[in-house]
Image (cartoon, helix red, strand yellow):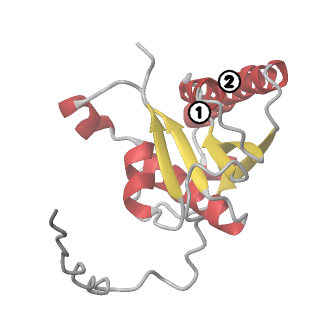
Amino acid sequence: CCISISPSPPARSPPLRPPPAQHTMPDDPSSSNRRIVIPVGGGKGAHYCLQYIRTMGLNPEEVTLLAVQDDMDKYNKISSRNKALARIDRQTQSLGRCMEFCQRNQLNCKSASRVSHIPTDGKSSSERIAQEVCNYAVENNIATIMTGSRKISGLKRWVIGSIGQLIHRDCDKCHYVQVRHPN
C-alpha cells in the first residue's frame, strides 16, 4: 500500500588521527594465516595459550614460543646469578612441555630465546620482558602476541604487575590476546 523512503545515513566523519604508516596488522585478527608469539616464563601461561589455540580451532601459520632471559653478565652476586639460572631452568622446562604439546597437537611451533640487553634505567624486569617481546614481534613481522593470565587481580596485580598488561599498554604494533586461567 505505502512505500516509505528513508533518507540515506549521514556520511561518517574521518577518524581523528590516521593509524601510523608502519602499522602492518591484518584487518581480520581471526585470519588463519597469521603468526603468533607467546612469551614463555616458568609457569603454565604459555601452555594455556596453546590449549586455547587448539580448543578454538585456530590454525596459525606459525607459533613462536619466546623465552626472554636476563643477561648473566649483569649479575655480580652469586645468589642473584643462581636465581637467574633457576628462572632459566624453569623456562626451559616449560618450553619443553609446550613443544611436546605442539607436536602432539600438530601445531607449527618453533622456540626462540632472546637475551634482554635493555638497560635497567629504573625499569622493572616485567617492563624489560614486555619490551623485548614487543620488539621481537615487530622485528619479525608477527601480528599477534598472546599471553596467559596468572589469575590474580586487585592489589596483588597492582603490586606484582603483569607482563600482559604492559604489552597491552605499550605494544601498539600487534594484536594482543590474553588467555585467562581455565578454572
- 48 over 175 or under it: above or below: above
Mark earlier in primary sequence (2, 1): 1
Query: At which x and y percent is residue 118?
Result: 57, 63
Q: CA distance from mark 2 to mark 1?
A: 7 Å
Between 136 and 142, the one nearer to me in the picture: 142
Which part of the image, by quadrant, shows the N terminus? bottom left
> Can residue 69 be seen?
no
Quadrant position of residue 134: bottom right
Can residue 112 be seen here? The reply is yes
Residue located 60% across and 72% down the image: 24
Q: Nearer the viewer, residue 159 or 106?
A: 106
Q: Are marks 2 and 1 in contact (CB under 8 Å)?
A: yes
Q: Position of residue 84 (x, y in %)?
A: 61, 35
The image shows residue 66 at horizontal and vertical percentages of: 69, 44
Helix, strand or loop under label 2 = helix
Which quadrant of the structure image shows residue 44? top right
Quadrant housing residue 103: top right
Q: Closer to the camera, 87 or 29?
A: 29
Residue where numbered disc 1 is placed: 41
Q: Which mark is residue 17?
A: none
Residue type at mark 1? Gly
Give the farthest residue toward the front.
Answer: 1
Compared across the picture, whether 124 is left or right of 144 comes to left
At label 1, counting other C-alpha atoms closer than 10 Å, the crowd grade (few under 14, some 14-19, many 20 or more) is many
Identify the residue at image location x=63%, y=66%: 138
Residue matched to label 2: 94
Specify the amino acid type for callout 2.
Ser
Relative to 182, say whether 50 is above or below.
below
- Which element type, helix, strand or loop, lies under badge 1? loop
